[in-house]
């Protein structure tokens, strides 16, 4: 019996000779244009700005608020087919639910919506920050980050994190056509992360870039404190681009 | 006596009428071309890459290592007038001292150099990270960050933090002329921060951007874990650009 390596297709074949499926192109993202996007806390500046940009890009958007009337009023201002509802209806009717509530009420809001959010793709974009005379600083959630708190409170949901580094001012400005920013997307399941990346990519100028698992969310959330320092020093609305990608 | 406000220069003058000094342009940075730059841990990939780029840009650079012989060997490889010395001599002879030692020996190395680093501008670029099967993750230094540990150990030095998000591979590649990355610079004293910004700006393609005080260093250091995830997914050498600045 020969001990020479078999070079025609067995397990001994050198790796480069196998007809291996090519690695998935990380820029190859799903079509998400038919998905309904809910925005919890959609009457705040960040939520409203995101709702506006996504709806303008052709996405069906429902704004959620504790008070349905306030959500409907905000939706009316935004146009582009945006609807308003209370948070529970917003979560229930949406495929993707962006969490843009203040950090202050984050845990409580999500706990109350556990049932409505079952099976949903949740996108946490909350930045736990404190402010004092010296500016903004990172808070340290017991779970590690807002996103990890969401994952702990919503075990039946598919929790991801994204949309942290956006300027609410730019998002809401109708005179600005492109948002010159990359969106770092974090999550445990590649398919879910890619849906969020594709959603970010719907907004002109924006790209969704995979940036690790949820355990890396704290620094992404906290970096907003640094961007606030940048904005003060340079009188800017700073965002981030990932180079060489 | 008239109660009409005095409009010719007293404290009653409306603010817009005062000949106020214009706010300092944050892009107006000092000339640092004559300063000597030391790189502690300059034989490691990050330190060596930085030393190479700064020397190539015309800066006088001294590489430091625990073993002077190793530092001199690395300096010889780099050319561009780079010298090698043991860490103590490197610190003593330099105006700006970049700390690029492994996180593992960070505290011990700085403690041993307290005297040599007195009065020096220290630039910490160390990223405290752990690694496991899932990739890289942020460690949590007791002082908050590597930079804050440096500040605690070196009360007589001027501690800043910068140069965290650079690819050692790109820095060391002689075929690459420009490093397409912004450098976030953190520190307590504006004059010190601006020197480090100017130093970063000496490297073609690079800009130094003020990004807050040292208490915001943890997330800047930790973000390297996310960039490692980016690099793995996209087979890239990712860096960051700050937009709208």
Image (tube, coloured by chain):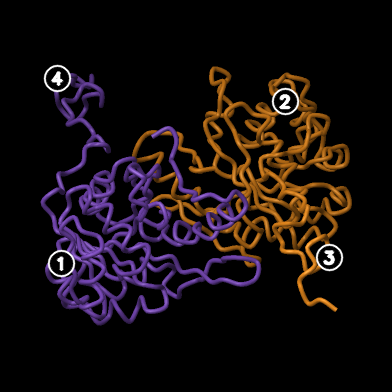
Chain colours: A purple, B orange
User: Rounded to the nearest whole Å, what is the CA distance between mark 4 and mark 2?
Assistant: 52 Å
Are the numbered discs 2 and 1 placed on the same chain, yes or no? no
Question: Which is in the foreground here, disc 4 or disc 2?
Answer: 2
**Mark 2 = which residue?**
B55
Q: Which quadrant would residue B9 be assigned to in this image?
A: bottom right
Q: Are marks 4 and 2 on the same chain?
A: no
> Residue at the location (35% across, 78% down)?
A107
Whether discs 2 and 3 lie on one chain: the answer is: yes
Q: Label 3, label 1: how many angstroms apart (C-alpha)?
A: 67 Å
Question: Which disc is residue B11 wearing?
Answer: none
Q: Residue A80: horizontal and vertical position, in percent?
A: 18, 55
Residue A77 against residue A130 in the figure, above or below: above
**Residue B137 in the figure: left or right of residue B121:** left
Which of B21 and B151 lies nearest the eye of the viewer? B21
At numbered mark 1, what does the secondary structure look like: helix, strand or loop? loop
Residue of label 4: A8
Q: Residue at x 68, y 48 (%)?
A: B124
Q: Circle 2 marks a residue in which chain?
A: B
Q: Chain of mark 3?
A: B
Percent across and percent down for residue A232 are: 59, 56
Q: Which residue is mark 1?
A: A119
User: Which badge, 2 or 3, comes first in the chain's sequence?
Assistant: 3
Closer mark to the observer between disc 3 and disc 1: 3
């Amino acid at each position: 019996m020969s001990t020479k390596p078999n070079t025609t297709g067995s397990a001994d074949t050198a790796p480069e000779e196998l007809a291996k499926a090519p690695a998935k192109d990380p820029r190859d993202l799903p079509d998400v244009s038919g998905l309904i996007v809910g925005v919890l806390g959609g009457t705040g500046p960040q939520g409203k700005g995101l709702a506006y940009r996504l709806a303008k890009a052709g996405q069906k958007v429902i704004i959620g608020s504790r008070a349905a009337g306030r959500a409907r009023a905000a939706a009316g201002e935004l146009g582009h087919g945006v609807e308003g509802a209370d948070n529970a209806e917003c979560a229930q009717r949406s495929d993707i639910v962006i969490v843009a509530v203040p950090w202050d009420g984050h845990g409580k809001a999500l706990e109350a919506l556990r049932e409505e959010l079952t099976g949903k793709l949740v996108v946490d974009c909350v930045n736990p920050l404190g402010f004092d005379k010296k500016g903004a600083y990172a808070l340290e959630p017991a779970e590690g980050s807002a996103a990890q708190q969401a994952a702990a409170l919503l075990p039946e949901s598919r929790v991801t994190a994204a949309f942290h580094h956006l300027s609410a001012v730019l998002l809401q400005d109708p005179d600005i056509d492109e948002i010159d920013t990359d969106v770092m997307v974090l999550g445990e399941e590649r398919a879910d992360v890619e849906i969020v990346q594709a959603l970010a990519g719907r907004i002109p100028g924006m790209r969704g870039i995979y940036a690790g698992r949820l355990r890396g969310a704290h620094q992404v959330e906290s970096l907003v404190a640094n961007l606030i320092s940048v904005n003060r020093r340079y009188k800017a609305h700073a965002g981030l681009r990932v180079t060489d990608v």
